[in-house]
């Protein structure tokens, strides 16, 4: 990690939308471009440095439309300083070739999930061949991947991937633990410690997020292990039992407050770029 980064810095990534929640069930979910830009600006002001983006179509359904993705990247770059990460996971219904084409929108970063996992009643498909294709494409297009880990075995896949194809573009290896998905590793401190202990030495930074009610235990465990935080309505829709999230910025504010208690100051987007090898 570069010397100009405060040792106590905290990367807060916001994942404001996701692909799983219906707008009809959650009107506060940012599904249009103006809503996404407003959310991004508020979350940046609250302390987020990176945004993990899923987009929706005019009917608020998950989309990987290339033109829409390109417009989204352009709008977020024009209106915020946030590191723009596009999801290549999309929804469980998106074909693999459409997920590869996400990189045509030239984001700063892309998510890259390291293996197939049961995902509630569905399957989130990430066969080894696809993981390799996406990784090589990210190197070719100079897009920094964030390695998404839903289960412990996927950490071993990261070692296999780095052994075969070398380091990502930018030279840093950033992992995000997505915990508590029904079908993946549980959102517990024990599981987090096991996953972190299994990381290859090449990992330079990592964050964690817990789905639903695992959000707080995972955030607290991540902070106590020196990790960074991902928060947002992609992963959690309530602040506490019976208290719905009304804006993604509330979750960013909570992450920043937890970080302050742990004496970790939020990284600026520029510091985040250094952390992630984009400077
Ligand atoms: N929506 C999930 C099926 C990612 O963004 O890369 C996959 C996902 C992971 O959200
Ligand atoms: Zn996602």
Image (spheres, helix red, strand yellow):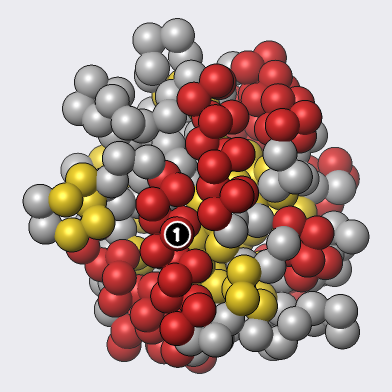
Position of the C terminus, as image quadrant, is: bottom right
Residue lying at 38% horizontally and 19% vertically, measured from the top left = 61
Q: Residue 106 location in percent, x, y?
A: 79, 34
Is residue 95 in view?
no
Residue lying at 43% horizontally and 24% vertically, measured from the top left = 31
Whether residue 234 sits left or right of residue 119 in the image: it is: right
What secondary structure is marked by label 1? helix
Q: Which residue lies furthest to the left in this view?
A: 242
| Count of labels in the image | 1
Neighbours of disc 1 within 10 Å: few (<14), some (14-19), many (20+): some
Whether residue 243 sits left or right of residue 164 in the image: it is: left
Q: Residue 97 location in percent, x, y?
A: 61, 28
Q: Mark 1 points at which residue?
A: 253
Q: Residue furthest top?
A: 58
Residue lying at 70% horizontally and 47% vertically, measured from the top left = 82
Q: In this view, does 149 lie above or below 86?
A: below
Position of the N terminus, as image quadrant, is: bottom right
Q: Residue 109 location in percent, x, y?
A: 71, 48
Foreground residue among 74 and 48: 48
Residue 18: name its quadrant. top left
Residue lying at 83% horizontally and 51% vertically, measured from the top left = 139
Q: Residue 182 location in percent, x, y?
A: 23, 57
Is residue 247 in view?
yes
The residue at label 1 has a CB less than 8 Å from ligand 2 = no
Q: In this view, does 276 lie above or below 118?
A: below
Residue 24: name its quadrant. top left
Q: Is residue 40 above or below residue 264?
A: above
Whether residue 74 sits left or right of residue 150 in the image: it is: right
Q: In this view, does 185 lie above or below 117?
A: below
């Amino acid at each position: 990690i570069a010397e100009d980064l405060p040792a106590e810095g905290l990367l807060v990534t916001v994942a404001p939308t996701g692909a799983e929640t219906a707008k009809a069930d959650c009107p506060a979910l940012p599904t249009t471009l103006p809503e996404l830009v407003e959310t991004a600006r508020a979350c940046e002001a609250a302390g987020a440095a990176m945004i993990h983006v899923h987009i929706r179509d005019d009917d608020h359904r998950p989309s990987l439309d290339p033109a829409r993705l390109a417009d989204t990247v352009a709008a977020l770059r024009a209106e915020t300083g946030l590191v723009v990460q596009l999801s290549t996971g999309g929804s469980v219904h998106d074909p693999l070739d459409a997920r590869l084409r996400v990189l045509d929108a030239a984001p700063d970063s892309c998510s890259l999930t390291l293996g197939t996992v049961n995902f509630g009643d569905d399957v989130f498909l990430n066969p080894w061949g696809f993981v390799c294709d996406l990784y090589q494409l990210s190197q070719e297009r100079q897009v920094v991947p964030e390695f998404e880990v839903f289960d412990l075995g996927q950490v071993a896949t990261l070692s296999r991937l780095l052994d075969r194809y070398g380091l990502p573009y930018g030279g840093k290896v950033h992992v995000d633990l997505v915990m508590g998905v029904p079908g993946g590793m549980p959102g517990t401190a024990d599981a987090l410690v096991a996953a972190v202990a299994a990381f290859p030495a090449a990992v330079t930074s990592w964050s964690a997020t817990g789905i639903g009610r695992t959000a707080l235990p995972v955030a607290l465990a991540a902070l106590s292990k020196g990790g960074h935080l991902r928060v947002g309505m992609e992963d959690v829709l309530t602040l506490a039992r019976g208290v719905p999230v009304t804006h993604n910025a509330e979750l960013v504010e909570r992450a920043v407050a937890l970080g302050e208690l742990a004496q970790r100051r939020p990284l600026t987007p520029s510091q985040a770029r250094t952390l992630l090898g984009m400077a």
